[in-house]
Image (cartoon, grey):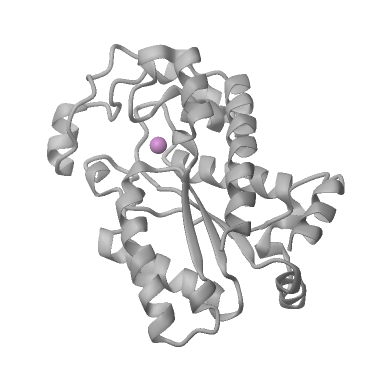
Amino acid sequence: MLEKRTKIISEPLESSLPIRLDLRSWPEVESYLKQCKGVILPIGSTEQHGPTGAIGTDALTAEAVGLELGRLTGIFVTPVQAFGMAEHHLGFPGTMSLKPTTLINVINDLVLSLAQNGFERIFFVNGHGGNIAPLKAAFHQIYSNAINQNLPVASNLRLKLANWFMVPEVFQEARKLYGDREGQHATPSEIALTLHLFPSLLDKHLPLPAPAPVGPINNHQDFRARYPDGRMGSDPYLAKPLHGKILLEIAAKSLSKQLLTFLEES
Ligand code: NI
């Protein structure tokens, strides 16, 4: 596994295309599995991100980090799971949420599909805090199901959750750039990454009044009452496309170490 990865890493990759699972044929995937059992699965959310942020922010950022991570390591990347657990954002139009139990079952089915054909290491690059609890619950359900279904890979199956926005180096850079105005939702760091990926988003990137302060997250009606424009303590106007480029590089570089360690773990 290591030899093949080293070989892949040493090859200059001009784009992320070679590591996209959705652009590979099944014989190519079968051949890849003879060398490497690992895959990156980006997961985000489709939900409001304040009055100036894109609804797809969490999915777009997770996908970008996942693809950059794949490009750095040569590990295949699945299509992004763009829908997450966003029940608390349902007071805002455009939000599309999966209930916690639905998300657990979706992740269960996707991972078991991969595992059935030999994938043993699934590395989740997550872009949304609301997905963390359902993902952790799903992992335990999947481990049990893999054993109960007698999957050949059951004993070697390992699942890892990596939240790109919580990587210590990313967190430090966001603090350096934005201080307390990073906030907790519709943050300038995640918005900066979307501006880097899609410069047309600058058209709606406008100054905003002071946001509601960070506080608890309860039901979606309470959320909208507490945080009327959708932001939690953040000033996304501080975001610049160049920041997004830097944060993407920091996240992918840091996660590449985590991923390679994960692939070698027993
Ligand atoms: Ni977000």
Residue 247 seen in the current view: yes
Q: Is residue 38 left or right of residue 157?
A: right
- Asked if residue 239 lies left or right of residue 64, the reply is left
- Expressed as whole percent of the image width and height from the top left, the position of residue 264 reads 63, 58
Q: In which of the image's four quarters is ligand 1 placed? A: top left
Q: Residue furthest right?
A: 11
Q: Residue at x 63, y 20 (%)?
A: 242
The residue sitting at 60% across, 33% down in the picture is 248
x and y, in percent, of residue 92 in the image: 26, 40
Give the side of residue 106 with respect to residue 111, left or right. Answer: left
Give above or below for 186 relative to 8.
above
Q: Residue furthest front?
A: 266
Residue 77 vertical placement versus 66 (above, below):
below
The residue positioned farthest toward the bottom in the image shown = 150
Q: Looking at the picture, tell me which residue is in the foreground, 166 or 68.
A: 166
Decide which of 10, 204 is in the foreground and name it.
10
